[in-house]
Image (cartoon, rainbow, N blue to C red):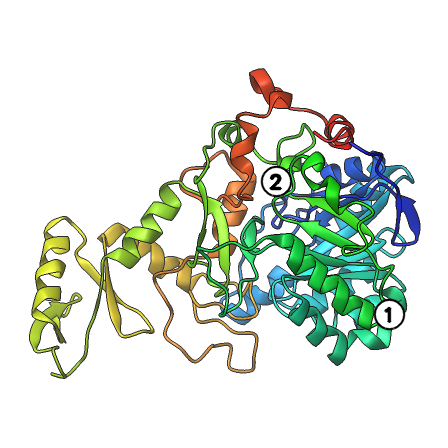
């Protein structure tokens, strides 16, 4: 394995090794500060980050507002306070070494307000902002107003071209790098386009080479690309180093930093990572954001799959093959379905899935009364954590609504990510991970359940393993 050459990232020469940001307190000030202290770029999550009381205990993010909009304002206040808190922790941990970045999602609630609030309250502590989950046109202008670098997350050259043409060309001097996040391998939300097949992964090399060609047209030949998603052993990427088709490159690690001593996830989550097999992490389309996402197979995902599998189309009048009556709901209102679908529905009802919930696509899903009540309560308790949410129909607009029926096939993402980040319940909550997480089990570095410090992990990565 050839020697890694340092890169100038956010104004300083550092190792081209980046900790990927993971939302809702999964990459925090402790983990990102330790990564920076090891000589790389640490990235804490600015998505509803934790704050602490005087005794060092996490302050639970409870909501007391009577309306969604009131709870939305509470959530923004939590997010700003938490982001500032984690920036300070990361800065102290780094002790002047490496670089500290903050990761935000453009589709999160009030992304612009949160960014301004954190960057204003943590001036001088944050060197760069990475931003994806949407098309973050205004991230350049916001970061430029604070004199810090910005790092858009894209999954194609076409996406970067659109961002550059519309906004980034005005702020070229602070474009610190471009993060290419592989849509088939990265954990969390993935940027698959409608023209790409989730079941047919593409080799990242030609896609990143195309991105470099596009960047070169804009005079960005020396601007680093961060390769994110699927990176495990650096020796597997050695042909990318000093390759003119790729240019200056750094490697972003999202999954491997989960299994470190500084990682804030529960011991149960860490132990689960050591047991995963290939295929246990897969793409799904249940997220209320509308994006594909990669998560670990568990009871949470199995329940969501079950909801969608117990699904039939219906009409409120006799139309086409929808000629058979079906009484649904407590009031036994009649809808019309195909005869074969009525047989399926009665079968599900006999198994205890007695509640029929309507979706925005004129279908019914069948769930247990307990699950129906949980869905109803979660929708009522919505705090507007996204710019637009399919599950609750919240939207960050004057109406406070997407204008569509709430979709019971999805889930409250804020609730489940807070729960998995702060409890040991890994079976009934959403557990994001990259597709290479199964490699923990066979990587000799983790033999006998060894969990390294961040410093030990970075040293190991530098060897090529």
Q: Is residue 430 visible?
A: no
Instruction: Using residue 191 as the reference point, say whether residue 210 is left or right of it.
Output: right
Image coordinates of residue 343 in percent, x first then y, are 8, 61
Image coordinates of residue 228 in percent, x first then y, are 67, 50
Please give the name of the residue rendered at 66% of the width and 53% of the height, measured from the top-left corner: 205
Q: Is residue 419 visible?
A: yes
Mark 1 burial class by Cα count in 10 Å: few <14, some 14-19, many 20+: few
Label drawn at residue 219: 1
Secondary structure of the residue carrying tag 1 is loop
Mark 2 burial class by Cα count in 10 Å: few <14, some 14-19, many 20+: many
Of labels 2 and 1, the one closer to you:
1
Image coordinates of residue 190 in percent, x first then y, are 55, 57
**What residue is pinned by disc 2?**
255
Q: Which quadrant: the C terminus?
A: top right
Q: Earlier in the sequence, mark 2 or mark 1?
A: 1
Rounded to the nearest angstrom, the CA distance separating label 2 from label 1 is: 33 Å
Please give the name of the residue rendered at 41% of the width and 64% of the height, measured from the top-left corner: 380
Towards the viewer: 146 or 75: 146
Instruction: Using residue 463 as the reference point, say whether residue 430 is left or right of it.
Output: left
Label drawn at residue 65: none
Secondary structure of the residue carrying tag 2 is loop
Please give the name of the residue rendered at 82% of the width and 76% of the height, measured from the top-left corner: 169
Instruction: Using residue 457 as the reference point, say whether residue 7 is left or right of it.
Output: right
Please give the name of the residue rendered at 66% of the width and 36% of the height, measured from the top-left corner: 257
């Amino acid at each position: 394995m050839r020697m890694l050459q340092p890169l100038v990232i956010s104004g300083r020469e550092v190792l081209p090794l980046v900790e990927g940001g993971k939302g809702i307190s999964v990459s925090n000030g402790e983990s990102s500060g330790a990564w920076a202290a090891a000589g790389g770029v640490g990235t804490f999550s600015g998505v509803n980050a934790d704050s602490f009381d005087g005794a060092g205990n996490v302050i639970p993010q409870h909501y007391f507002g009577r309306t969604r909009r009131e709870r939305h304002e509470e959530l923004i206040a939590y997010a700003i306070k938490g982001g500032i808190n984690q920036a300070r922790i990361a800065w102290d941990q780094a002790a002047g070494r490496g670089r500290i970045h903050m990761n935000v999602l453009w589709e999160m609630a009030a992304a612009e307000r949160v960014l301004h609030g954190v960057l204003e309250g943590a001036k001088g502590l944050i060197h760069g902002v990475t931003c994806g989950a949407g098309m973050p046109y205004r991230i350049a202008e916001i970061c430029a107003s604070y004199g810090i670098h910005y790092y858009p997350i894209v999954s194609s050259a076409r996406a970067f071209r659109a961002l550059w043409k519309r906004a980034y060309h005005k702020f070229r001097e602070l474009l610190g790098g471009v993060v290419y996040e592989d849509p088939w391998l990265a954990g969390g939300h993935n940027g698959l386009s409608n023209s790409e097949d989730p079941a047919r992964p593409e080799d990242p090399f030609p896609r990143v080479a195309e991105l470099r060609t596009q960047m070169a047209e804009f005079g960005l030949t020396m601007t680093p690309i961060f390769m994110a998603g699927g990176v495990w052993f650096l020796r597997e990427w050695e042909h990318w180093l000093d390759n003119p088709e790729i240019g200056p490159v750094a490697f972003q690690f999202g999954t491997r930093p989960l299994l470190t001593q500084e990682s804030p996830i529960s011991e149960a989550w860490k132990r689960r990572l050591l047991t995963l097999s290939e295929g246990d992490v897969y793409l799904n389309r249940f997220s209320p954001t509308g994006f594909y996402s990669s998560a670990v197979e568990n009871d949470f995902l199995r329940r969501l799959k079950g909801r969608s599998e117990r699904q039939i189309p219906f009409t409120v009048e006799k139309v086409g093959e929808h000629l058979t009556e079906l009484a649904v709901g407590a009031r036994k209102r009649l809808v019309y379905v195909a005869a074969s679908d009525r047989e399926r529905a009665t079968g599900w009802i006999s198994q205890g899935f007695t509640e029929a919930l309507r979706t925005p696509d004129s279908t019914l899903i069948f769930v247990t009364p307990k699950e129906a009540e949980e869905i109803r309560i979660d929708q009522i308790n919505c705090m507007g954590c996204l710019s637009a949410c399919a599950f609750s129909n919240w939207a960050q607009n004057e109406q406070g609504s997407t204008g569509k029926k709430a979709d019971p096939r999805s889930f409250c993402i804020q609730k489940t990510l807070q729960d998995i980040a702060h409890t040991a319940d890994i079976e009934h909550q959403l557990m994001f991970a990259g597709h290479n997480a199964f490699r923990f089990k066979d990587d000799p570095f983790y033999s006998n359940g060894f969990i390294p410090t961040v410093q030990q992990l970075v040293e190991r990565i530098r060897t090529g393993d």
